[in-house]
Image (cartoon, grey):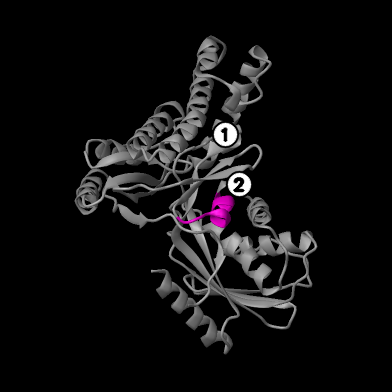
């Protein structure tokens, strides 16, 4: 799949600029195996880069202007590098303007370049195409002009660019896009940015995403509300247990003991956060032991927590997970991402995938009149230079 994307992107560049590109960069989307809504609660997350990518072609143009083509959108724009960078009305261009601004603000010196890019990351499915766009652009400029930028710094600049665009994201998306390794998940400490790799050998199971193809409008307001409720919860916990600084230092019993001091919603959000942080560590242990059954069980538990305690699921996502839970060939399923739509991430026994896909798609259409989108994914390398063999 990536080979076709590389050929298409390279050919488009050559046709439009009359020369071959100097650098080809591949920048992946990401999944998160477990650890949802705890990046802002000082927890741990367990993401991985996937084999859905944005392919970039770059070359210097010996000027102070840069020209960028988005092949899939059939749109282009130019940026004058001698003028202050400002937000544009064309949304996708802001992610690129944002990283150019980050590079300039940090004192990196570079000249004009031409760039074209194309992607097979499904947009709007929660696979972080924006992080792939940011990190791939920074990486390409770094390679083109021999800039010295460590990988973690690329991720942090990508995150800051997204904040500049107006989306207050955590670090997980950019970090996993840049730092991913084939067949490895990354356990990231969201408090310190310490990280460690764990083998992701799913043995007899395939990793499949079912995209609900819905996006409910509650997302932004509910996200902010959950953050506020968690802040209220940890404040009450600290007040009663001064030795605790965040949910990761807290036990379930401590939260249960404070139930009467919290509103119902604050209690439920706090209990979820403590349980989910623990589940990430248990998931790493399961992966290290090759115990994929336990990993699957933890995924089901996470979905239950997100649906009942954190209340960020929706009827469509719940239907997908509840249906798959009845299937012997499915050992784990949960909603992935912020919620109120997007994808479920699922572990399905090899050889049984097509039957499950077909049955679920039919039931989903009958229930909601919506087409289910399906993506087979593999865990892959992070943002990298493509070297032709």
Q: Is residue 140 above or below residue 325?
A: below
Dot 2 and dot 1 residues touching (CB under 8 Å): no
Secondary structure beneath label 2: loop
Q: Is residue 236 above or below residue 343?
A: above
Q: Is residue 23 above or below residue 307?
A: below
Residue 178 included in the magenta stretch of the image? yes
In this orientation, which residue lies closer to the viewer: 83 or 347? 347
State left or right for residue 229 relative to residue 202: right
Residue 361: image x %, image y %? 24, 50
State left or right for residue 113 relative to residue 19: right
> Sequence-wise, which precedes: disc 2 or disc 1?
1
Magenta segment: 173-182
The residue furthest front is 289
Q: Which image quarter: residue 132?
A: bottom right
Q: Which residue is mark 2?
A: 171
State left or right for residue 138 relative to residue 35: right
Q: Which residue is mark 1?
A: 43
State left or right for residue 183 relative to residue 45: left
Residue 174: image x %, image y %? 58, 53
Magenta part, dominant SS? helix
């Amino acid at each position: 799949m990536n080979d076709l994307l590389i050929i298409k992107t390279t050919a488009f560049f050559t046709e439009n600029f009359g020369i071959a590109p100097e650098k080809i960069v591949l920048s992946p989307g990401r999944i998160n195996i477990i650890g949802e809504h705890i990046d802002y609660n000082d927890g741990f997350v367990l993401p991985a880069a996937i084999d859905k990518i944005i392919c970039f072609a770059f070359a210097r143009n010996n000027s102070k202007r840069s020209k960028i083509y988005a092949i899939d959108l059939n749109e282009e724009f130019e940026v004058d590098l001698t003028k202050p960078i400002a937000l544009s009305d064309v949304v996708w261009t802001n992610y690129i303007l944002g990283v150019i601004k980050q590079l300039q603000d940090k004192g990196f010196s570079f000249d004009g370049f031409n760039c074209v890019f194309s992607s097979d990351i499904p947009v709007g499915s929660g696979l972080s195409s924006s992080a792939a766009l940011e990190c791939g652009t920074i990486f390409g400029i770094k390679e083109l002009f021999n800039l010295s930028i460590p990988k973690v710094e690329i991720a942090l600049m990508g995150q800051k660019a997204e904040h500049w665009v107006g989306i207050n994201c955590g670090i997980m998306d950019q970090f996993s896009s840049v730092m991913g390794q084939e067949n490895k998940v990354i356990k990231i400490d969201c408090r310190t940015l310490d990280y460690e790799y764990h083998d992701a050998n799913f043995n007899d199971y395939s990793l499949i995403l079912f995209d609900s193809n819905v996006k409910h409008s509650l997302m932004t307001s509910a996200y902010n509300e959950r953050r506020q409720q968690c802040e209220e919860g940890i404040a009450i916990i600290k007040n009663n247990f001064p030795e605790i600084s965040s949910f990761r230092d807290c036990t379930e019993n401590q939260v249960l003991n404070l139930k009467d001091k919290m509103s119902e919603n604050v209690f439920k959000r706090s209990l979820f956060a403590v349980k989910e942080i623990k589940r990430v560590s248990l998931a790493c242990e399961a992966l290290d032991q090759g115990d994929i059954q336990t990993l699957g069980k933890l995924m089901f538990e996470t979905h239950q927590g997100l649906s009942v305690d954190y209340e960020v699921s929706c009827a469509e996502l719940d239907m997908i997970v509840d249906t798959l839970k009845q299937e012997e060939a499915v050992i784990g399923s949960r909603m992935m991402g912020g919620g109120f739509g997007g994808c479920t991430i699922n572990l399905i026994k090899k050889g049984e995938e097509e039957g499950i896909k077909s049955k679920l798609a039919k039931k989903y259409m009958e229930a909601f009149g919506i087409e289910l989108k399906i993506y087979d994914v593999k865990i892959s390398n992070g943002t990298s230079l493509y070297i032709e063999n």
